[in-house]
Amino acid sequence: MASYNKVILMGNLTRKPEMRFTQGGMAICKVGLAVNRRFKDAQGEWKEEATFVDVTLFGKRGEAFAKYHDKGKTAFIEGSLRLDTWEDKQSGEKKSKLYVVADDWQFVGAGGAGPGRDMVREEGGDGGAETSGGYAQAAPSGADDVDDAPF
């Protein structure tokens, strides 16, 4: 049976990005993203409902994300769903958590040009850039130093 696992989200960060590193030096960035849904209720009135999603970014992408984002800032994230399962040490109860592993992200809002405009196409060679599908992340508008850009 064929399957497809792709998630595209845009929302606001609910907390400051949390950076950790594995013993091998791999960066792990964890963030919370609030994504709103607007709909009409049975009485025809507009309602807004927030969904809170945990997102994990690995490697250089995670480091760059943490450098340029903070609580409340808008982010556009592409990735896939993952399910972790474990047994609670105190109760022995089985637990699970669904979260997103980000493959790519873009700047949006006041600090960037919006979805689809912040991706820079890499033409040939890797040039040291971490890319996904041939794209590298562009530096945010107003970046002070080109050497600090995440690519």
Image: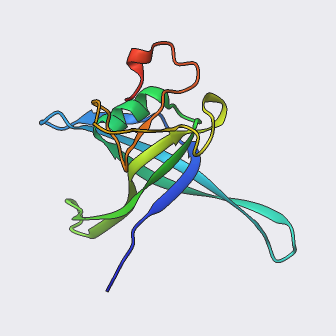
Question: In front: 60, or 135?
Answer: 135
What's the residue at 48%, 32% (across, down)?
Answer: 138
Q: Residue furthest front?
A: 124
Q: Quadrant of the C terminus?
A: top left
Query: Where is residue 91 shown, x and y percent of the image?
Result: 24, 65
What's the residue at 47%, 28% (across, down)?
Answer: 68
Horizontally, residue 72 falls left or right of residue 144, namely right
Q: How many marks?
A: 0
Picture layout, residue 61 above or below residue 100: above
Query: Where is residue 120 shown, x and y percent of the image?
Result: 47, 37
Query: Where is residue 117 shown, x and y percent of the image?
Result: 58, 40
Horizontally, residue 70 falls left or right of residue 87, namely right
What's the residue at 42%, 23% (across, down)?
Answer: 149
Q: Quadrant of the N terminus?
A: bottom left
Question: Residue 128's quadrant in the figure?
Answer: top left
The colour scheme of the drawn protein is: rainbow
Query: Where is residue 92 shown, x and y percent of the image?
Result: 21, 68
Q: Residue furthest left?
A: 24
What's the residue at 47%, 46% (across, down)?
Answer: 32
Question: In front: 4, or 54?
Answer: 4
Q: Residue furthest top?
A: 144
Q: Residue furthest bottom?
A: 1
Picture layout, residue 54 above or below residue 25: below
Picture layout, residue 3 above or below residue 9: below
